[in-house]
Each structure stands twice: as structure tokens, then as C-alpha cells.
Amino acid sequence: MIRHIVYFSVRSDTDRARVLDGLRLLEANPHALHLEVGENLKLDSLGNEIDFVVYGEFTDADALDAFKAHPSYEASIAAVRPLRDIRVAADVMAREERRSS
């Protein structure tokens, strides 16, 4: 299983609701085993540049590719890209998958 984690910050606080709505378009995408979109609670005292996190779980790289090819992904990009500042993504193999390899 692949865990796909993407961090976003917004350029302007006035755009927070629009960015969140744009990220939530991803929830209509059927290719994730699990998908969450959430606001950073900013509880860590060492830095809070990130405003939103998208966390998804996918069976494999093909499922992640299908997720990125889905119209909801394109719609989300169109809504969010003009309003975001930082976007950092990471894809990691789930621990149980690493053990069996």
C-alpha cells in the first residue's frame, strides 16, 4: 500500500475556504482506499507554515496514477493551484508492505 501525503499552504487567509473546498473535490475520486482532507491544527511549536493536508492510501502505484488521472484531481488542481503557496508531496510504502518485500 502506498501512502500519499500532500501539504499545502495558502497565499492569503481570505482564500482558505476556497482552497479547502478545492481539496475536498478529491473526496469524489474512487481510486483511493482511504482519503482525508484536513486543516493543520498547528499544534507543533516548531513551525506552522502548512495550512492543509491531503492523506490518501492506495493499493499500488497504478491506483495512485488512476487517482491523478481522474477528473476530480484535475478539478482540484484547477481550483487550488492559483491560490496555494507551498505544495509538498511524499509517497511512502506502508510499513507492512516494506516488511513483506
Image: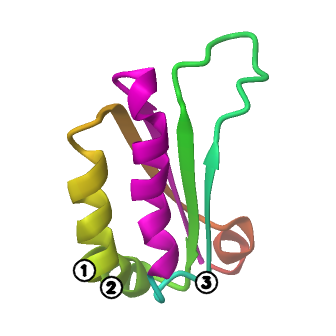
Query: Circle 2 is placed at which residue position?
Result: 66
Residue drawn where x is 39% and y is 33% of the image: 15
Q: Secondary structure at mark 2?
A: helix
Of the two numbered discs 3 and 1 on the same chain, state the one appearing first in sequence.
3
How many C-alpha atoms fall within 10 Å of the one at disc 2: few (<14), some, or many (≥20)? some
Count of number-bearing discs: 3
On the rendered image, what quadrant is the C terminus found in?
bottom right
Residue drawn where x is 26% and y is 80% of the image: 71
Asked if residue 11 is among those painted magenta in the image, a careful observer would answer yes
**Dots 3 and 2: beta carbons under 8 Å?**
no
Residue drawn where x is 40% and y is 79% of the image: 61
Residue drawn where x is 74% and y is 74% of the image: 96
Residue 51 appears left or right of 29: right
Establish if 83 lies above or below 58. Answer: above
Viewer-nearest residue: 50 or 22: 22
Query: Circle 1 is placed at which residue position?
Result: 69
Query: Circle 3 is placed at which residue position?
Result: 33
**Dots 2 and 1: beta carbons under 8 Å?**
yes
What amino acid is at disc 2? Answer: Ala
The boundaries of the magenta stretch are: 1-28
CA separation in Å, label 3 and label 2: 12 Å
Residue 87 falls in image quadrant: top left
